[in-house]
Image (tube, rainbow, N blue to C red):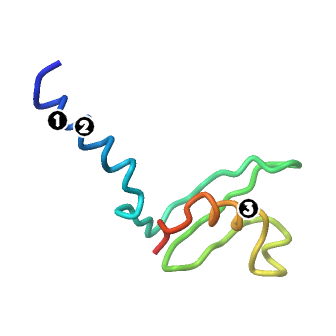
């Protein structure tokens, strides 16, 4: 492995440890729910999920789990 690649790997490791430097602005996730998969989207500062609970409440276990996983990285 050349020294340039070693430097990039070291930099990638540092970025992975410094999570506060990473900010998601939009993405789509397939969430394997207990009954069936659900699609969760994040964009323009808003969550969307195709589950029935989200449609009625504007928040659900899928979006809350992703908020916990990505704490400090959204926005």
Quarter of the view holding residue 56: bottom right
Q: Tally the marks.
A: 3
Q: Are marks 3 and 1 in contact (CB under 8 Å)?
A: no
Q: Secondary structure at mark 2?
A: helix
Q: Residue at x 80, y 50 (%)?
A: 33
- Could you give the CA–CA distance between mark 3 and mark 2, rounded to whole angstroms? 33 Å
Q: Nearer the viewer, mark 3 or mark 1?
A: 1
Whether 41 is drawn above or below 34: the answer is below
**Label 2 CA crowd tier, 10 Å (few <14, some 14–19, many 20+):** few
Q: Which residue is mark 2?
A: 10
Q: Which residue is mark 3?
A: 62
Q: Earlier in the sequence, mark 3 or mark 2?
A: 2
Residue 62 on image: x %, y %: 73, 61
Q: Are marks 1 and 2 in contact (CB under 8 Å)?
A: yes
Q: Residue at x 25, y 37 (%)?
A: 10
Q: Nearer the viewer, mark 3 or mark 2?
A: 2
Whether 38 is drawn above or below 75: the answer is above
Whether 53 is drawn above or below 14: the answer is below
Quarter of the view holding residue 58: bottom right
Q: Earlier in the sequence, mark 3 or mark 1?
A: 1
Q: Which residue is mark 1?
A: 7
């Amino acid at each position: 492995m050349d020294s340039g690649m070693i430097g990039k790997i070291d930099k990638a490791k540092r970025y992975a440890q410094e999570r506060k430097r990473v900010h998601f602005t939009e993405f789509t996730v397939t969430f394997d729910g207990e009954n069936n998969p659900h699609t969760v989207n994040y964009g323009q500062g808003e969550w969307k999920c195709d589950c029935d609970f989200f449609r009625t409440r504007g928040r659900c276990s899928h979006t809350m789990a992703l908020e916990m996983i990505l704490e400090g990285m959204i926005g």
